[in-house]
Image (cartoon, rainbow, N blue to C red):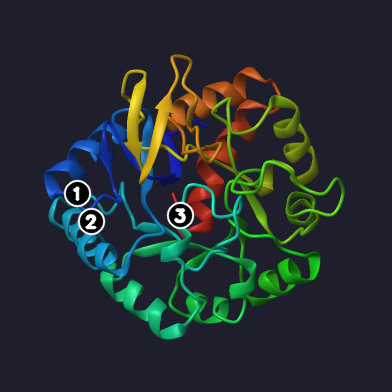
């Protein structure tokens, strides 16, 4: 099977453009979108991380209206909100600002949905937001769990409520976890949740990627780039998603104070090339994890 390119459900920005920046313009968005679509990605979801309501009110309509104005709904079918209904605990909050995280409420979700002008395709929430999940699903939005601790029972309840995914499994967690009872194993054991994974060579070691694939199977894996505004930039020090971050020559992007990664500095093509080089999947399985699965989970048939 020949495909036109890869599908990336989590792109936070590109070439210095931050989709969660208070200075984002329509021209900025288009520059970043063109860079993504010229890098081997054929469909992507611009992702806005946990932000203030003021920023949501500014950026979400801007992004949605720019997509519509430029006729890009085929290549950019919607928006991914990673937050604000996440867990504030250190480690789980990752590079997100915990002060902007909100309790899961129907009314607040309605406001975010409306700000996206009907283009909200995917939202990442904590497992504790399970009472909100059926309501989100009723609006036609795919739900992923992430940035939270979660017991097996919580993940089971979330899946029963309609959650389908786990966002960047193995990341968005503390650097130190209990040896056996932890959210990574719990998510792997919940068969109803597909795992989104970042295969840029920094977010997950090859052995972990192998274990995830062996456990979930290709039909339940979705590769994402988690591409950041630093993607496409030279090594240096940058403000990335509100973090003072270092981009090393080999491509690692991290906050030295929080000791956490700050998204990826690579494109979806780089992630798929890295995964191909690990020789864990056939070519058809690579198409499944990088094209078929992400399209299917946001309801697009191609």
What residue did someone put label 1 on? 24
Q: State the separation of the CA atoms marked 3 and 2.
A: 23 Å
Q: Secondary structure at mark 2?
A: helix
What residue did someone put label 3 on? 301
Q: State the separation of the CA atoms marked 2 and 1.
A: 9 Å
Say which of 80 and 126 sits in front.
126
Q: Secondary structure at mark 1?
A: loop
Q: Residues within 10 Å of mark 2 (few under 14, many from 20)?
A: many
Nearest to N terminus: mark 3 or mark 2: 2
Say which of 13 and 292 sits in front.
13
Q: On the image, which quarter does residue 212 sit in?
A: top right
Q: Is residue 137 visible?
A: yes
Q: Residue at x 46, y 72 (%)?
A: 102
Q: Residues within 10 Å of mark 3 (few under 14, many from 20)?
A: few
Where in the figure is residue 85, as x and y percent of width and height? 50, 68
Nearest to N terminus: mark 3 or mark 1: 1
Q: Are marks 3 and 2 in contact (CB under 8 Å)?
A: no
Where in the figure is residue 71, as x and y percent of width and height? 18, 52
Numbered circle sitting on residue 221: none
Q: Residues within 10 Å of mark 1 (few under 14, many from 20)?
A: some
Q: On the image, which quarter does residue 69 sit in?
A: bottom left
Q: On the image, which quarter does residue 49 sit in?
A: bottom left
What residue did someone put label 2 on? 63
Depth check, mark 3 against mark 1: the one in front is: 1
Quick check: 164 left or right of 229? right
Q: State the separation of the CA atoms marked 3 and 1.
A: 31 Å
């Amino acid at each position: 099977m020949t495909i036109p390119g890869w599908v990336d459900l989590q792109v936070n920005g590109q070439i210095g453009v931050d989709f969660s920046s208070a200075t984002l313009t329509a021209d900025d968005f288009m520059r970043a979108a063109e860079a993504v679509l010229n890098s081997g990605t054929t469909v992507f979801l611009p992702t806005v991380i946990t932000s203030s309501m003021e920023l949501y009110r500014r950026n979400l309509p801007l992004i949605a209206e720019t997509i519509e104005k430029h006729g890009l709904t085929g290549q950019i079918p919607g928006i991914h909100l990673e937050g604000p209904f996440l867990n504030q605990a250190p480690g789980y909050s990752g590079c997100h600002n915990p002060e902007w995280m909100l309790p899961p409420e129907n009314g607040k979700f309605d406001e975010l949905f409306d700000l996206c002008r009907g283009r909200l395709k995917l939202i990442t929430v904590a497992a504790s937001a399970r009472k909100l999940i059926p309501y989100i699903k009723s609006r036609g939005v795919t739900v992923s769990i992430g940035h939270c601790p979660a017991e097996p029972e919580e993940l089971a309840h979330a899946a029963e409520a309609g959650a389908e995914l786990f966002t960047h499994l193995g990341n968005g967690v503390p650097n130190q976890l209990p040896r056996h009872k932890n959210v990574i194993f719990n998510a792997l054991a919940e068969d109803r949740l597909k795992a989104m994974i970042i295969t840029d060579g920094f977010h997950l070691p090859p052995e972990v990627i192998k274990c995830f694939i062996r456990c979930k199977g290709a039909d339940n894996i979705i590769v994402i780039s988690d591409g950041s505004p630093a993607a496409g930039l030279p090594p240096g020090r940058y403000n990335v998603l509100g973090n003072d971050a270092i981009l090393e020559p080999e491509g690692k992007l991290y906050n030295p104070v929080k000791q956490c990664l700050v998204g990826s500095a690579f494109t979806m093509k780089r992630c798929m090339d890295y995964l191909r080089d690990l020789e864990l999947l056939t070519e058809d399985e690579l198409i499944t994890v990088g094209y078929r699965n992400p399209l299917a989970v946001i309801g697009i048939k191609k």
